[in-house]
Image (cartoon, helix red, strand yellow):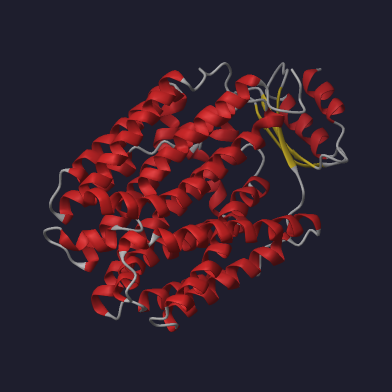
Amino acid sequence: MSVTGLNSLEKKAAFSLASVFGLRMLGLFMILPVFAIYGTHLTGYSPIWLGLAIGAYGLTQALFQIPMGLLSDKFGRKPIILFGLLIFMFGSIVAATSTSIYGVIAGRALQGTGAIASAILALAADLTREEQRPKVMATIGMFIGVSFMVAMVLGPIVADLSGLSGLFWFIVILTIFAMFMIQFMVPNSVNKAPKGDNVALPKKLLSLLGNAQLARLNFGVFALHMAMTACFVVLPRLLVEIGFPLAQHWQLYLPVLLGSFFVMLPFMIIAMKKQIENQMFSAAVLLLTISLFLLWFVGNDIYLIFATMFAFFVAFNYLEATMPAFLARIAPAGLKGTAMGMYSSSQFFGAFLGGVLGGFIESKYPQQDVFLVMALVVAIWFLVALSMKQLKKSKSYSFAMSLDGEEQVDGIAEQLINMPGVYEATLVFEDAVAYLKVDDKTVDLSKIKALLSS
């Protein structure tokens, strides 16, 4: 097999799993641009309940992300993914048939219980060679970004044609299609990637809580998704109030999202080439802060709102795309799966709290004060981001080990860490696996393989 590109199995796995992930996220995102309008017609409506309905899926996603990943390791990836999609479909049906805000909240919470992200990423790792795994993960990340853009455009169109209930029934159809793809298009796992790289290990969670770099990143993704969710508690209604009908919102979202995506790409390239990733990251957080302050300040001018939203999504897309890459480089060797579990839980808990906090602020104060509060939260993140350490360029590898006894582990680990280009080495005797984080330009992988196989 060639190591220079994806083979046919990896291509099929990348496209099919990315499509399933994208369809799943499309179903979650489509509610954001419309619920602030259509939710007001539900029995029991209040701004707080509406915010809870928008964010409810985030709480259950945060709670079930790690358990579902562990179940996939025990019972198999595909069965757990199908089970999660089935739960998501039932949640969508509950929301579709509800006439009260409470029923929609229950449906949204049930949607989030089908937390399949960790299981999908683990299956993607199982189906790919280590040197090709970043390409597959990047493909999945790209599809998530595309699904967000499509949801912002498609949500108002579908809701305008069929109402809130029709939107949830449309999500049911998407979920059935995703289940079909998992069953018939996604390859069966032919190997298992090492657990520590892809599945969160609960016993290791505490060991990561004291990692200051990871803590900054987890707080960042928490703040990012809290701000985004809170904004969509009030933004659709604000646009309607200034004379921009919901059915036309896609005309705003489409150019804003597409344009912001293409604008942020050169900055990503420049940051990597000139090795100013930390500085560009902090600049993006600052831009996000300024754009939120401006959304609070601009009032009812549609052109100023358009320009400010454009700046918001340039920053949002940049941060959303770069933070997983930062995570991969920060996570200790052999604990990437655990670090990703904490990161994902922080992300979804931020979405939950953003919905609740947005609804609470709107119920007590002018709706645009939501932007002000979120600006202050992101400003704190900016101060936190300034203290991030410069990241080393590194790659992660895992190798099978040949050991005669556990007493060898410490000696081999000491030899590995003293090799040129090796930043970290974690050896797991029970799994006979060595996890390494290395400088790919200076490390001699042949010497590492020889040591571990001797």
**Residue 88 in picture, x, y percent from top left:** 31, 37
Count numbered badges in the picture. 0
**Residue 334 in picture, x, y percent from top left:** 63, 36
Viewer can see residue 335: no
Identify the residue at image location x=30%, y=81%: 366
- In the image, is residue 5 above or below residue 266? above
- In the image, is residue 226 above or below residue 15? below
Residue 248 horizontal side relative to residue 292, left or right: left
Viewer can see residue 428: yes
Identify the residue at image location x=46%, y=32%: 119
**Residue 151 in picture, x, y percent from top left:** 41, 50
Q: Could you tell me which quadrant the N terminus lies in?
A: top right
Q: Could you tell me which quadrant the C terminus lies in?
A: top right
**Residue 3 in picture, x, y percent from top left:** 76, 25
- In the image, is residue 231 above or below residue 174? below
Which one is nearer the viewer's eye here, 434 or 258? 258
Which one is nearer the viewer's eye here, 260 or 390? 260
> Which image quadrant for residue 356?
bottom left
Identify the residue at image location x=30%, y=53%: 56
Identify the residue at image location x=31%, y=66%: 245
Residue 249 horizontal side relative to residue 403, left or right: left
Which one is nearer the viewer's eye here, 38 or 417? 38
Residue 208 horizontal side relative to residue 374, left or right: right
